[in-house]
Image (cartoon, coloured by chain):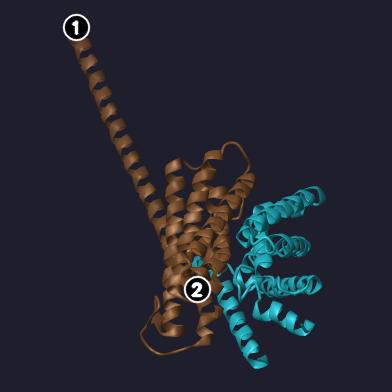
Chain colours: A brown, B cyan
């Protein structure tokens, strides 16, 4: 069955949509995004070992259980750290789990037939893009809504509106458009390169054929010349 | 607690689409098929009520008394996966056409995320029936946004738009506008 294609950039944006309520502050968002990215990469690394045994849905179930297990462990660890910031973040870890589950769509449903290099490269790239988007978006929101960056205050402002989902969705739309443009441009470049390689191959083959024809013509004339002398 | 306040909080203030964000996943796959949209949403409603009820019972009568609240997430995901898997099997036997759309649009993953999100964001401090009402209102808020996006589908997925700005980006902008309206409504009523 042909599944609807979702590009990694759009998937990263959708995963960030799950964390909209946690993107108020840069530090919180960074820790949550790193936790989600780590769960995602770890889960996919384990699930990739059983890709030839089971169906995609069963692999997703295993992946979801691994991710929720890792989130439970992280909650315990953050609880033991005891810092107020980490206790606050541990309450939001469930949203990071939702984001990790969304990110899992791409490797589990699209890359299951790809070779291992592409599989891991795409997985890690998607994870990194997700973390970068989260850090940049949350930093912008923190500066505009609270006048601080990673907890350090620069100016005294408080715009509740910008702290709500409004600005997050606008920024996500912007990032999605830019990311999709880059994806389309790189796909176009890859296609052009492939066409160029094909053209060079064709030219090389043509020249080889021309050389062979020339050689065979020469051989024929040599044979005729030898026959005439006889 | 007043039912009106619960309904307003669940459907507008904590709307799963424009306030929490994860509800957008349920909005995207329903493009043209009205019956499929209704079947999918009905599935989410029934499953969310089952999952939230089970989660409520487990949380309040097992995890909270024994101080095991950290394990709640794992248990919730297990409940959601089991419920969704059963739902998928029922849909497979009931309707081939709807199952085709279900498979094509990754609704297994989408429903798992939505169900887990609805249970996580549900107010577990309320009593059981109020909690069920809260879950129902959360779904109502999501369904309302779903209907808005379904009506605007032809504009959002317009072929004349460039590839970069088709589908997700306009949806996010509409969500931003809805978030703004929700924020203003919250301020007006407060």
The kind of secondary structure element at disc 2 is: loop
Q: Residue at x 72, y 82 (%)?
A: B8
Give the x, y percent position of residue B5: 74, 84
Give the x, y percent position of residue A230: 19, 6
The one nearer the camera, A84 or B4, is: A84
Q: Residue furthest front?
A: B66
Q: Is residue A90 visible?
A: yes
Q: Which residue is mark 2?
A: A23
- Residues behind callouts 2 and 1 on a single chain: yes
Q: Residues within 10 Å of mark 2 (few under 14, many from 20)?
A: many
- Do callouts 2 and 1 mark residues in contact (Cβ within 8 Å)? no
The kind of secondary structure element at disc 1 is: loop
Examine the rendered structure and indicate whether residue B112 appears above or below residue B151. above
The one nearer the camera, A174 or A149, is: A149
Give the x, y percent position of residue A99: 55, 62
| Left/right of residue B70 with respect to residue A115 in the rendered view | right
* In front: label 2 or label 1: 2
**Chain containing mark 1:** A
Mark 2 or mark 1, earlier in chain:
2
Q: Residue at x 40, y 78 (%)?
A: A151
Q: CA distance from mark 2 to mark 1?
A: 94 Å
Give the x, y percent position of residue A149: 39, 78
**Chain containing mark 2:** A
Q: Which residue is mark 1?
A: A230
Q: Is residue A178 visible?
A: no
Q: Residue furthest left?
A: A229
Q: How many numbered marks have been drawn onto this rendered protein structure?
A: 2
Q: Residues within 10 Å of mark 1 (few under 14, many from 20)?
A: few
């Amino acid at each position: 069955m042909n599944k609807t294609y979702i590009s990694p950039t759009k998937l990263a944006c959708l995963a960030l949509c799950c964390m909209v309520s946690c993107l108020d502050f840069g530090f919180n968002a960074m820790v949550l995004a790193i936790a989600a990215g780590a769960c995602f990469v770890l889960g996919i690394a384990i699930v990739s070992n059983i890709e030839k045994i089971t169906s995609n849905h069963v692999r997703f179930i295993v992946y979801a259980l691994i991710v929720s297990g890792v989130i439970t462990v992280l909650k315990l660890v953050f609880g033991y750290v005891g810092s107020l910031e980490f206790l606050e973040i541990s309450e939001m870890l469930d949203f990071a789990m939702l984001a990790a589950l969304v990110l899992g769509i791409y490797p589990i449903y699209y890359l299951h037939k790809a070779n291992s290099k592409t599989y891991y490269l795409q997985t890690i790239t998607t994870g990194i893009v997700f973390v970068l988007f989260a850090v940049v978006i949350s930093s912008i929101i923190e500066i505009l809504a609270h006048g601080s960056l990673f907890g350090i205050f620069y100016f005294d402002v408080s715009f509740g509106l910008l702290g709500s989902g409004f600005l997050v969705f606008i920024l996500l739309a912007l990032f999605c458009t830019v990311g999709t443009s880059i994806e389309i441009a790189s796909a176009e470049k890859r296609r052009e390169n492939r066409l160029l390689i094909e053209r060079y191959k064709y030219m090389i083959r043509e020249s080889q054929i021309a050389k062979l024809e020339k050689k065979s013509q020469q051989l024929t004339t040599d044979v005729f010349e030898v026959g005439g002398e006889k | 607690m007043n039912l009106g306040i619960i309904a307003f909080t669940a459907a507008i203030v904590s709307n799963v689409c424009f306030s929490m964000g994860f509800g957008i996943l349920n909005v995207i796959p329903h493009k043209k098929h009205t019956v499929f949209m209704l079947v999918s949403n009905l599935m989410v409603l029934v499953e969310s009520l089952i999952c939230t009820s089970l989660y409520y019972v487990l949380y309040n009568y097992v995890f909270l008394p024994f101080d095991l609240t950290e394990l709640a997430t794992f248990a919730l995901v297990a409940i959601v996966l089991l419920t969704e898997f059963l739902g998928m099997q029922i849909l497979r036997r009931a309707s081939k056409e709807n199952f085709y759309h279900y498979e094509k649009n990754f609704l297994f993953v989408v429903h798992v995320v939505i169900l887990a999100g609805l249970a996580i964001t549900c107010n577990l401090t309320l009593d059981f029936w109020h909690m069920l009402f809260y879950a129902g209102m959360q779904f109502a808020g999501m369904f309302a946004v779903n209907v808005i996006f379904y009506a605007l589908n032809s504009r959002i997925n317009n072929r004349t738009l460039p590839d970069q700005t088709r589908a997700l980006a306009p949806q996010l902008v509409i969500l931003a506008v809805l978030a703004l309206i929700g924020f203003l409504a919250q301020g007006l009523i407060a």
